[in-house]
Image: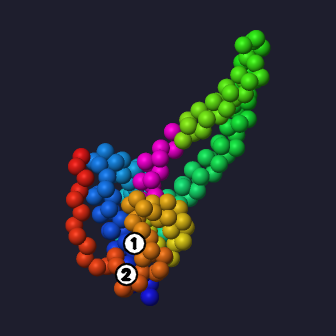
Amino acid sequence: MNAAAQEACADFAVTHMIDVLIAETHATEQQVARETLKTVLEPFVEEIVNADLDEAEARNIETAVNNLHIICALCVETLKLIDQVKSLANAAADVIAQSVADGLGDHTFLTTAVKAVLKDALTRSFEAVIALAADPVKVKMLRVIGFATCPNVKAHPEVEKYCVAPLANEYVTASLQEWIDQNFPSDSALLKRAPRRNKKKT
């Protein structure tokens, strides 16, 4: 399959994913998707609009944005960083919980067993607080944006790994995942007309 056909199929895959997102989510989640998209794109667009570019440079910027893996690469790198922060935080959770437990002082009611339970409870709370810092819904929407802005998902394996695969069985249906994995076969069941879905009530 040539690059132009791959890109057309990738565009169709994104459209299919967005249709599923709209059909399967409530208005509040769709609003988070819009806000996340605005957060990612607004400063990027403002910087370009305010740049001192001549007509040729402006066309070059437009070509770059439309054809290169710019926004999707940004999303992937952000998702990687979030994974690294979570990993570091999980590794540090035990040390931090022990430090808090050790700082409680010497009290007769703080038996070895009590301290051990408090340390485990603090570890769990710390992990929960870290999870709040990376809002799961916003992270999911960042994955959606990474997929949606990728000019050709088959040419950008990291988008498949960090954006498409984690959305599997959610906005990326099993049939869509299979179609992407098999490099967009033309005889896929995904391309056959399917009955219309009923949109979830808000």
| Rendering coords of residue 16 (x, y %) | 33, 68
Would you say residue 37 is visible in this rendering? yes
Q: What stretch is highlighted in magenta?
A: 132-146
Name the image quarter holding residue 179: bottom left
Q: Which residue is drawn at 39% across and 66% down?
A: 173
| Residue 141 within the segment the image draws in magenta | yes
| Rendering coords of residue 57 (x, y %) | 42, 70
Foreground residue, 142 or 172? 172
Q: Which residue lies furthest to the top in this view?
A: 108
Query: Would you call the spot at circle 2 few (<14 residues within 10 Å), some (14-19), or many (20 or more)?
Result: few
Magenta residues, dominant SS class = helix
User: How are the colours assigned in the image?
Assistant: rainbow
Q: Which residue is drawn at 42% across and 68% down?
A: 174
For residue 121, side relative to residue 193 (left or right): right
Question: Where 10 sits versus 43, above or below?
Answer: below
Question: Where 127 sits versus 103, above or below?
Answer: below
Query: Would you call the spot at circle 1 few (<14 residues within 10 Å), some (14-19), or many (20 or more)?
Result: some
| Rendering coords of residue 134 (x, y %) | 51, 44
Of mark 2 and mark 1, the one earlier in the sequence is 1
Q: Mark 1 points at which residue?
A: 175
Q: What residue type is labelled 1?
A: Ser
Q: Name the residue under label 2.
A: 188
| Residue 121 within the segment the image draws in magenta | no
Q: What element carries label 1?
A: helix
Q: Is mark 2 on a helix, strand or loop?
A: loop
Q: Which residue lies furthest to the bottom in this view?
A: 1
For residue 193, side relative to residue 149 (left or right): left
Tag 2–tag 1 contact (CB < 8 Å): yes
Question: Where 193 sits versus 86, above or below?
Answer: below
| Rendering coords of residue 35 (x, y %) | 36, 48
Would you say residue 38 is visible in this rendering? no
Q: What residue type is labelled 2?
A: Ser
